[in-house]
Amino acid sequence: MIKTPQLQLIAGRISDALQNSRISEAFSELTSMAEATSAPWAIKNEIARLQEGFGFLREYAVSGVEDPSRDDILAEIKAGIITQTEAIVRLSMIEESPKIYFSNLRYERLQSDSSIPGLIGEFTAFNSALSMMTFTSPSAKSDNLKMEKNRQMDMARRIFNVIWTAFPLKPDDATAIRSVLSEETIRSEFRELFLSAVMLGAFEFYDERRIVLLAETYLTATGDLELRALVGLVLSLWMQRESLSGKSLKNVMDSVREKKGWADDLKMIFLNLVRTRDTDRITRTMNEEVIPGMMKLRPEIFRKFSGKDLSDEFDPEEMNPEWESLLEKSGMADKLKALNDLQSEGGDVMHSTFAALKGFPFFHQVPNWFLPFFTEQTDVADVLAESADDLGELIAMMPMICDNDKYSLVMSMSQMPSANRRMMVEQFKMQNINLSELRNSLLNPEIASRSNRANDIIHDFYRFFTLFRRKSEFVNPFAKPINLAAVGLLSPDLVDREALQAVGEFYFKRGYHTEALEVFRLLLSEDGAASLWQKAGYCEQQLGNITEALSLYRRSELLSPPGQWLRRRIAYCLKMLGKHEEAVGYYKELSEEKPRDLGLALSLGHCYLALGRFSEALQCYFKVEYLDENGSKALRPIAWCSFVEGDYERSEKYYAKILAGDPTPTDYLNVGHLYLVRRNFKEAAGYYSAYLQKVGGDSGKLYEAVSADKEYLAKAGVDPLLVSLVLDKAVFPAS
């Protein structure tokens, strides 16, 4: 039996053939795959049907028959090829794969009632009965009712697993899911859970019907269900961007494009998805800088405040001004401000806080990661039963915390003393009062709330793919920078330069130069302002692509009069590419404008040095020495230029200063040259030996280094034979 890795290679070739419109080649690969794996009759029959349809389409086209539906038919054939390819690969993994996906699938195969329509019908009926029981029972906390709610939760989890692992979704499956998603008597949290299963399954294997279902839900739903469908749709399109095909998908996306607010929604989701790129950096900042920094402050705080008379009258809510002083001195204030700014921009600053609270048994089950927070959820209700009546409601209203983290908070509270819980209630109350004030101050609270809620849903998904204990079994949609403009079905909707500019600036501001460059390139394809060419050039420069950076800088130079920043970058690139003569022109002009700039003088000197214009280089280096307060930046170039120019006395004086500091191997080499030309051969051999020690005794490096400088030694009149003898003494001192 052919192994799964080999099948995945064949699947890759099929995908490549389809993308390049080599349909017969794709069929050839697919037919061979089906034969090699002894695929079921249903799959082979479907492949034959698709191939026959393609044969008719091709013959009609070659015969010159006009067919306005040709593109749609071809799209359906491509979608069918992809689906059957995925089906064969999936079948090869069912029996042996240890992934949780296939474990659930194997379990359901053993059950007699694992059809999606059947389970959803049972759940809907049970939900109606439970609603009636809750309405008629005077005791909402009765043991019987609690047991029934536990059963409801278990049923919901099972439905999630069955929807997630079904492939491909059958028409009856999709109909049943649509029905339950539109059933308003069922809690919205359960409907959102089932919709998340549709999305998660779409990530595993390409299934056009799943993506169509997400799009249809976005078109018809409202509130959080609509937003979850939106996020799921966009992520599914991103994850399956190489496979998207089919008439149904094209048609539903045409409908989506006509929906009022779609362009704004897509822009909002794009920006929120882009922000997830920053989560790892925020987490590192919290774990490596902020938290350790705060811990270091603790002894200082206690030292400063110990010994004070605590019996004095004081305002218990008054802040100590010395705290702020400590934060400023430690640099923590700037870090905390930066984190606060990130949070206000939608940054996921809570990821690091709650990452350690995902070890509870609750998080061992995949469905629980996608379950919106609600206080009647059975695991939550058990913890809150011992708490203040309004604690659950306060947690549900907490801003800046996604649903997944709210579950973490509740689970951790089960291990908390009652006094600590009461303190939390008071803190939450105060926070929510402030939240009300914030909401009242917003000019567009509905828009802000919609964006924040979408961001919370994205954070929930991000938690699963980065923190679930078996996360390696899932393809992470956030693993690489998300560029929705690369999705063919979405690119027509991302013509908004403002949105793309915002994405590019986000990446650029945070130093994600690869991602920023990709977006800037899209903008530059339609021309762009000089500043955009500059930023693209800067990204290329930071990535080490100096030739490309220079080209982009030069384009900007043509668009508007270049300022000092741009001319300096151009000069730098020219210098790095060895075009020193051109670089000199820029550096001279810049140095005249900024005569006291050490960097410019030093760079100009380096260009003269590379061109062999040593006297001019020395003038620059002496200027640096004069301007440099420490007087150390120009020591080495002055010493070397003086040596090359034959001023050995001055060279020796400068090398003495260098050797008194922190000399490098090259310093010892150059001093060896200096003593060699002054015919002080023993000292020369000694310094060459010192160089040898610095490079780990590698004599080959010594010979290469001396050979590279042979023209300067020859110019100074040193006999090559003497050079070899001195080197021999340095390498073999005891001979």
Image: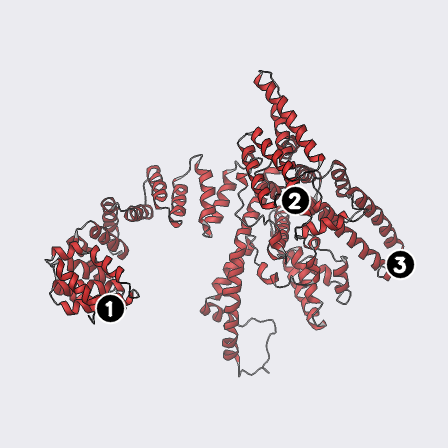
Give the image's coloring scheme: secondary structure
Q: Position of residue 672 (x, y in %)?
A: 18, 65
Is 118 left, or right, of 417 in this rendering? right
Counting from the top left corner in percent of width and height, residue 529 is at: 41, 39
Query: Which residue is denoted by mark 3 in the rendering?
Result: 138
Is residue 293 in view from this perspective?
Answer: yes
Q: Quadrant of residue 279?
A: bottom right
Residue annotated with mark 2: 92
* Earlier sequence position, callout 3 versus callout 1: 3
Q: Is residue 193 left or right of residue 528?
A: right
Nearest to the eye among marks 3 and 2: give it: 2
- Nearer-the-camera pick, 313 or 614: 614
Tell me which numbered mark, 3 or 2, is placed earlier along the sequence.
2
Q: CA distance from mark 3 to mark 2?
A: 54 Å
Q: CA distance from mark 2 to mark 1?
A: 64 Å
Left or right: residue 527 versus residue 229 is: left
Q: Is residue 8 above or below residue 627?
A: above
Amino acid type, mark 3: Pro
Mark in the foreground, 2 or 1: 2
